[in-house]
Amino acid sequence: MGRRGMGFVATFDPVSEHERTRAALAAAIPRLARLLREVPDLDAASGVPRWSVGDVGAHLTSVYLAYGSVVSPDAADTAVDWGSVLPSGDLPFVERITAMNDASVAVVDGEGRARLGDLIAERGETFLRITGNLAPDAPVAAPWYGPGPTLTVAVVTGLMLGESLVHGLDMARGAGLPWSIGGDEASLVIGQSMPTMMSLALDTAKARGVRVAFDLVVEGGPRLAVVVDDGAMTVTRDAPPRAYDCRLTVDPAAFLLVSFRRTPIWKAVALGRMRAGGRRPWLAMRLGRLVATP
C-alpha cells in the first residue's frame, strides 16, 4: 500500500472490489424490499420532485429489470418492449436519461405497484444470479445512455448499488422511515461506477475550453484523477503522481448524495464532509457544474 501523503496512492484489486460491491448490493436488496412493504402510502411525495414513493419504487424495479435484460436476455423477464421505452433521436445526456426515467415509471402497472417489494427482491436476486459467473470487465450494453457507450459488469453493479442506496433514501424520506447509507457502500459506488459515468455525463458545452485537473480523494475509499481538457474528461483510479489544480477530500456518503443532488454542496462543506485544497481550491464548485445530472 502506498502512502497518500507522499504522493502515492493505494492500488485496488478489481476482482475483490467487485465481489464486495456484489455483497453490498445483495445486502441492500432485502432492505429495499422490507422498506417498500412497510411504506404506509405509496402515493406520498418522495425525495424526487414530481415522483411519489411508488413512482420511485417502480423506477427502481425497472432499473433492475433493464440491467438484467441487457446482461442476459434469456434469464430476465423480457415481457417489456424496450424499443418502445428507449428515447428516440440523438438527445443530450440529461434529456435522454430524464425521458428514460419517466418511461421507466410507467413500465410497472397497477398490479406490479401492489407488490413492489416482491419485484425488487425477485429482480435483484435475478441480476446477482445471472452475473455471478461473469468477469468484472465483461462488456454490457446500455442503450439508454445512447447507441455508443458499453459498460462493464463491474460498472453496472456499482450503478445498481448507487441507485438502490439513493432511491432507498428517496422512498424512506417520503414514507417517514429510516434509511442509512454507509461509508463503505458509498465508496464502492464511487470507485466502481463514477470513473465511467462522470466522463459519460460531462456537459461538453460547459467543458469546452476548460482545462483543469482535480485530485478527488475519498476518505477510506478510492482516489480519482479527474482531468477536463477542452470538452473531454478522463477519470483515472490510482493515477501516477502529477500536478493538480484542486484537491477535493470528501466523505464518501456525502459525496454520493451531493453527486446525486440529494444534498446541497454548501451543507456538505459546512459540515466538514467536503474540503477543498491545492493551488486553486475555488475550482471545487466547478466540478459539479461540469457533470450533468437529470
Image (cartoon, rainbow, N blue to C red):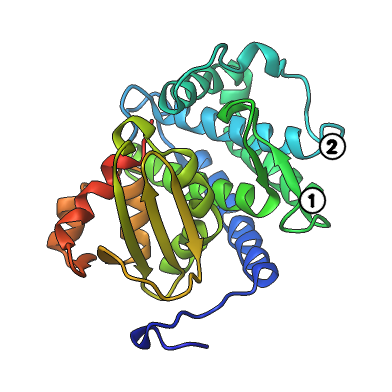
Specify whether 100 is left or right of 231: right
Q: Are marks 2 and 1 in contact (CB under 8 Å)?
A: yes
User: Where 83 falls versus 117 (above or below)?
Assistant: above
Q: Quadrant of residue 53?
A: top left
Label 2 neighbourhood size at 10 Å, few (<14), some (14-19), many (20+)? some
* Separation of marks 2 and 1 at Cα, in angstroms: 9 Å
Say which mark, if any, is on residue 153: none
Specify whether 162 is left or right of 64: left
Which residue occupies 22% across, 56% down? 284
Position of the C terminus by quadrant: top left
Residue under circle 2?
75
Instruction: Residue 182: give x, y in percent of width and height.
Output: 42, 64
User: Where 125 falls versus 71 (above or below)?
Assistant: below
Which residue occupies 61% across, 29% down? 62
User: Where 272 falls versus 83 (above or below)?
Assistant: below
Disc 2 secondary structure class = loop
Disc 1 secondary structure class = helix
Q: Is residue 178 visible?
A: no
Q: Is residue 186 visible?
A: yes
Specify whether 226 is left or right of 188: left
Q: Quadrant of residue 260?
A: top left
**Mark 2 or mark 1: whose residue is earlier in sequence:** 2
Instruction: Residue 131: give x, y in percent of width and height.
Output: 77, 51
Label 1 neighbourhood size at 10 Å, few (<14), some (14-19), many (20+)? few
Which residue occupies 46% across, 28% down? 93
Instruction: Residue 215: give x, y in percent of width and height.
Output: 34, 66
The residue closer to the viewer here, 34 or 68, is: 68
Residue under circle 1?
129
Query: What's the residue type where badge 2 is placed?
Result: Ala
Query: What's the residue type where badge 1 is placed?
Result: Arg
Count of marks overlaid on the render? 2
